[in-house]
């Protein structure tokens, strides 16, 4: 009973690892490497106390500006408003592709149908391919674990 429970747990862990390894085998290693150089930077933080001090100094003059802050929030809002207008201009762009699509459909009603036919088999093939490689990989990893045990 102990072996079966430990094997079940191993299988669950393997299933989780399988999804991670085939999708991003190198990326997790790359993320681990930059984290290591960042750790030595933490002891270096005491060496760079000037930067936090500089940030503290501007905060001190801002303290007397606190009564004037009602004027400051208005300025950032003004800067944010033009950004919102820019975003509003972007939805106008989708209207351009819609206009050419309307004349294209009546001109060539058969072509869109032909494009739809190849898309359907491609969509069916993609999920089948994604499922097939996962099954043999799981069997191989399971056999390796049993051999190691």
Image: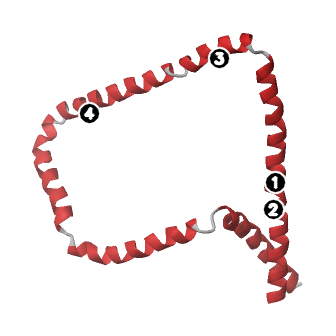
Q: Residue furthest bottom?
A: 149
Residue ID for mark 4: 76
* Quarter of the C terminus within the rendering: bottom right
Proximity of marks 2 and 1: CB atoms separated by less than 8 Å: yes
Q: Residues within 10 Å of mark 2 (few under 14, many from 20)?
A: few
Q: Are marks 2 and 4 in contact (CB under 8 Å)?
A: no
Residue plotted at (84% across, 84% down)? 146
Mark 1 neighbour density, 10 Å: few (under 14) some (14–19) many (20 or more): few
Q: Secondary structure at mark 4?
A: helix
Q: Which residue is mark 2?
A: 133
Count of residue discs = 4
**Secondary structure of residue under mark 1:** helix
Q: CA distance from mark 2 to mark 4?
A: 52 Å
- Judged left or right of residue 78, residue 139 is right
**Residue lying at 77% horizontally and 22% vertically, measured from the top left:** 111
- Classify 10 Å Cα crowding around label 4: few (below 14), some (14-19), many (20 and above): few
* Quarter residue 49 falls in: bottom left
Query: Residue at point 47% right, 73% down?
Result: 33
Q: What element does badge 2 sit on?
A: helix
Q: Residue furthest right?
A: 1
Dot 3 corresponds to which residue?
Answer: 101
Q: From the image, state whether disc 2 or disc 4 is nearer to you.
A: 2
- Marks 1 and 4 in Cβ contact (< 8 Å): no
**Residue carrying label 1:** 129
Q: Residue at x 22, y 30 (%)?
A: 75
Whichever of labels 1 and 4 marks the residue nearer the N terminus, that label is 4
Which mark sits nearer the N-terminus, 3 or 4? 4
- Local packing at callout 3 (Cα closer than 10 Å; few below 14, some 14-19, many 20+) is few
Q: On screen, 33 above or below 54?
A: below
């Amino acid at each position: 009973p102990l072996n079966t429970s430990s094997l079940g747990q191993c299988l669950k862990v393997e299933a989780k690892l399988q999804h991670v390894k085939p999708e991003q085998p190198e990326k997790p290693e790359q993320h681990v490497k930059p984290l290591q150089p960042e750790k030595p930077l933490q002891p270096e933080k005491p060496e760079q106390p000037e930067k936090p001090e500089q940030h503290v100094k501007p905060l001190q003059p801002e303290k007397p500006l606190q009564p004037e802050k009602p004027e400051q929030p208005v300025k950032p809002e003004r800067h944010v408003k033009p950004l919102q207008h820019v975003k509003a201009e972007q939805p106008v762009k989708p209207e351009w592709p819609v206009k050419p699509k309307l004349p294209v459909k009546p001109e060539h009603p058969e072509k869109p149908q032909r494009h739809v036919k190849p898309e359907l088999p491609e969509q069916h093939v993609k999920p089948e391919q994604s499922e097939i490689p996962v099954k043999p990989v799981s069997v191989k990893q399971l056999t390796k674990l049993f051999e190691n045990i």
